[in-house]
Image: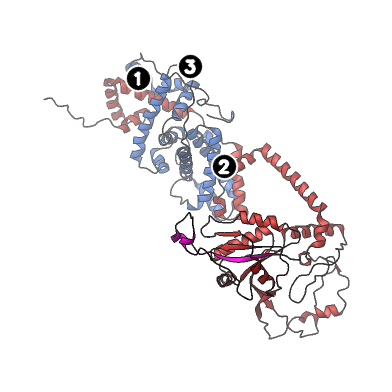
Chain colours: A red, B blue
Amino acid sequence: MDQQPSNPNPITEADLIGWVEGTLPAARDRMLRAELTRNPTLALRLQAMTQDRAILTSIPDEPAPAALLAAVQEAIERQTLFADAPALKIDRPSRWSRWALRPNMAMAAGVALVITGGVYWALVFSNASPVVRNMPTHDVPSVAVGPSTPNLGPRNAANGGSSGVTEIAPVLASDTTGELLPMQGDFAYSGSDTQTLALAEAVMKAESGPPRRPLDARTAELRRALELAEQGRLVIRVRTPAGTRVASKMDALAASASRRDPVRAWRVEGDVPPTLLASLTNAGPMTSLEERTVTVSPTLASSEPQDVGRQAGVTVPTRVVRDTLPAVSSPAAACMAEFRPTAPTLQALVAALSQKLGGEVILSEASSPQPITSDPADASSVVWWTQPPGTWGKWITVPVVVESNR
Amino acid sequence: MTTPPFHDARPADSGRPGDDDLTLIRAIRRGESAAWTPLLSRHQDRVYAVCVRMVGDRELALDLAQDTLVKVIQGLDSYDARSQLSTWITRIAINVCLSKLRSEKLRRHASLDAPSGGTDDPGRTFAESTAQTREQFAAERVQSGEDRRLVLAALMRIDPEQRAILVLRDSRGMDYERIAEVLGVAVGTVKSRLFRARTALREHIEALEKSGSGSGPGGGVVPPAAGRGRV
């Protein structure tokens, strides 16, 4: 039985690669050539590979288009502006941004933006006057013309005000409880530029409604609200600007109920039962859960103007107070809000109320418990469900009353 | 700052010292945002070239090159200078391209017209063939644009990982060590994969030749800056 003698130096893939690339050492090259003489198929294959490599290496590279650096430059500028690496991580150029990078498209988009902005402001100013007349006075910026004069309080008021200072905005009016009163009369502006600026700012504030109070899920206010909700003593009051279409906004709010989010699940459904509504309107003043700090002004200790407000050695402590809200008198709308009794859920509900109804949301405490039920009761009382009862969470129901803030 | 333009510097990816890169990186890390532009300008041509070779489409290559450079911006803090910056950036570019090709299962099915000239002469013996040196034969072949189209069309048809190794070796002129760095494999693996990639490329070329196609919408080599579209 013949046996092929084993080759002590077999041809390897590295040899073949070296031959194709012309980097094979001389000794191995001679050995491979001898092998290729005996194997013409392999020889042709290697020769073809050599040709392929020569072709690939001969193809010139193209320089990067100018648009590449421009697009990346945009990302760099964004990083410089925001100085926030995480923000840049969402900066994967979208099809929109690539589209916008094209000069013609960017120019067209810019023209469209200018036209849209012009039309918007034209509409705003054409309807500005009624809004300004109806807006709450606290939204009006107080713009003073003339030399700056410190507010000296009662002493200055006793002097009949600061002469030489022209108050462009009307004097703010408020009662002792901090409730804001509607402004009486029209504005009087002294300069056209100032008037335009003040008017624009007033319109923007009036349209955006009163400042929305941010709520954090960790605040004591939310925790207190949840406790009251469990006791049936929480009432959510929403104060919206007059004339807003509350009914349609309530429909939109109901349609946007967050049912799918297991953490922030809430819904706004149904009318408030007449008995409950009657109890709310007859319940008298309520207490706002929002706490605010109050600093009491110190007694005037000196007749010298520079010492006004100072009293040596006396530290005036700040106090935390809760406002007393007037009773619900004539609600514009009312509904029942159901939600899981968790802080994030209540926070989400408050945010939705504020956003959809365009008003200020006030968590308030009713003076007496309301006849409010929670659900679900038990699985036997539910005829259809999409998730097993073991996954059900407790939902609580609180009334939401929408009022005009005028 | 004397680095020549990348498109004029092939074979350029040979691992030359990147002192200028390091200077710019230090400036960036000191908060000098203006250093980004020269840094990216130094590498944008290389990135774009790799992407063009990998996907064979200028529009898509532009997007992928932009993705690559944005990733460079985002990840420069993680660059530890143990390898050349160009190697690191090339690795990102290859990964971006491979990710794109894998996700979209991008395949080129361009119909290729028959090449104007044959690529092999069946009657030619090995002895006759070897009478020509490799250099002579290569010079003859590279004059043919049709052959370029054929090779590029076949390149787009082989497996993206095999394509990457051919791009790095033949188009970018990288040595085995740098290719191993870019691909994250051993040098021996690079050699083994390289031979398989060449074999695959050859098989696709022969298949294209047999099918009577060689150029067409997907296989044309457009001269530099001659327009946008497939290459």
Q: Name the amino acid type tagged 2.
A: Ser
Q: Nearer the viewer, residue A51 or A150?
A: A150
Q: Residue B5, can we see it?
A: no
Mark 1 vs mark 2: in front: 2
Quarter of image, res A186: bottom right
Q: Are marks 1 and 2 on the same chain?
A: yes
Subunit bearing disc 2: B
Quarter of image, res A21: top left
Q: Name the amino acid type tagged 1.
A: Thr
Neighbor class of circle 3 (other Cα within 10 Å; few <14, some 14-19, many 20+) is few
Q: How many marks?
A: 3
Q: Nearer the viewer, residue B47 or B26?
A: B47
Q: Are marks 3 and 2 on the same chain?
A: yes
In this rendering, is residue A388 above or below B47? Answer: below
Which residue is label 2 attached to? B41
Which residue is label 3 attached to? B116
Locate residue B213, reporting x and y percent: 46, 20
Tag 3 near tag 2, CB within 8 Å: no
Give the SS element for disc 1.
Answer: helix
First in sequence, mark 1 or 3: give its number: 3
Give the alpha-carbon distance from disc 1 to disc 2, as whole Å: 44 Å
Residue at image position (60%, 74%) is: A369
Give the SS element for disc 2.
Answer: helix
